[in-house]
Image: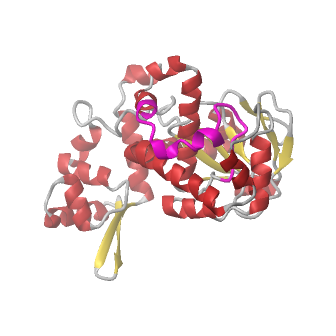
Amino acid sequence: MRVNFTADDLARTRFSAVPAPLMETGLALVEVRRAGVARRRMRTRLWLREAWRGFPAGARPLLDLVGPRGPWPAFIDSPAPDIEEALDFVRATPRWYLQEELADIWGDRPGRPPGWLRNLADGDPEALEIVVHALRAFYDAVVAPRWDTVLSSFHGDVARRMPMLAAGGHQTLFDTLHQQLRWHDDGLEREGFDCEYDLGGEGLLLFPSAFWTGPPVFVRGDGQRIGDALLYTAQPGGQAADTDDPLLSETGNDHLAALLGPTRAAVLRALWEPRGTAELAAAVDISAASASEHAKVLRDAYLVETSRVGRSVRHSLTPLGRTMLGQLRLAAEEPGDRAG
């Protein structure tokens, strides 16, 4: 693949503000499918072994739709930051797009597709609902339990790369994403490319993924609902993220607890996901009054922001708070690990 950039494309190329649950779901599913073909990889990644052993029955239709090798369906690649919004995006896929997608992904497979996939290509709402329920089942079983690590990997990767972009521009940034990517003659090329396309002045949306370990994946926009995107392996510490590790160790080299104190550090960690005061108190196992007080201290330090909706308040991390957690995650690694 080669993607041609204009000056407008470069100006509009940016990182996604947050990870996309359905994109991570699709990438995690492909990793599971690849692991089923090459079982040796499952011995090294705990989450893959767990996902294979506990693969939800409700997600089995996805095995017909998503193979271990591409092309993979793009109609499930919603960039929406909320899983419910993303699933509604899938439900709204037009028939013409389903027909094009399914013809493309089944082109090199032997035999005829299952009946339900043929119905899906015809735009059958029941077949489309099968996909939605299967995606939800896989997300609930595999992705949602690891979402805190997805968030930390995503924000840690972006925090590490932003100084590269500021100091060296897009060429320097692209050269760090993967060894198979290179910037050449005003375009981004992936090794062995045999097709190219233009971005049309809309730029490229960059998504670092905690689950994906393969080469970068280009997602072509449909010209209407989604734009062009590049999915790549998150490397918050200069190496691939590990979805089996927590954000920071609760024991040992915990720089966040040393800086803020253990309870306030736990409050900050818990706010990777926005929470009300009662939810925050329950997550950290403290009183609501104590949660409110810790949130105020963090808010005064510009690490947390609080918004009011009716009678309720909602606490969430500021960009500074997210960057701080991402950087402290790197500091929590052993120096020998970073050097490797």
Q: Which residues are magenta?
A: 51-75
Q: Position of residue 118 (x, y in %)?
A: 73, 50
Q: Is residue 62 magenta?
A: yes
Taking the image as drawn, is residue 305 in sight? yes
Q: Residue furthest front?
A: 115
Frontmost residue, 186 versus 21: 21
Question: Residue at (16%, 65%) from the top-left corner?
Answer: 288
301 relative position to 198: left or right: left
Query: In the rendered image, which quarter contains the N terminus?
Result: top right
The answer to whether 98 is drawn above or below residue 307 in the figure is: above
Frontmost residue, 37 versus 254: 37
Question: Residue at (53%, 39%) from the top-left corner?
Answer: 28
Taking the image as drawn, is residue 233 in sight? no
Q: Residue furthest top?
A: 40
Q: Position of residue 193 (x, y in %)?
A: 82, 32
Q: Position of residue 256 (x, y in %)?
A: 28, 43
296 relative position to 78: left or right: left
Q: Position of residue 250 (x, y in %)?
A: 24, 37
Question: Residue at (48%, 47%) from the top-left corner?
Answer: 58
Q: Main secondary structure of the magenta part?
A: loop
Q: How is the image coloured?
A: secondary structure
- State the image quarter where residue 49 is shown: top left
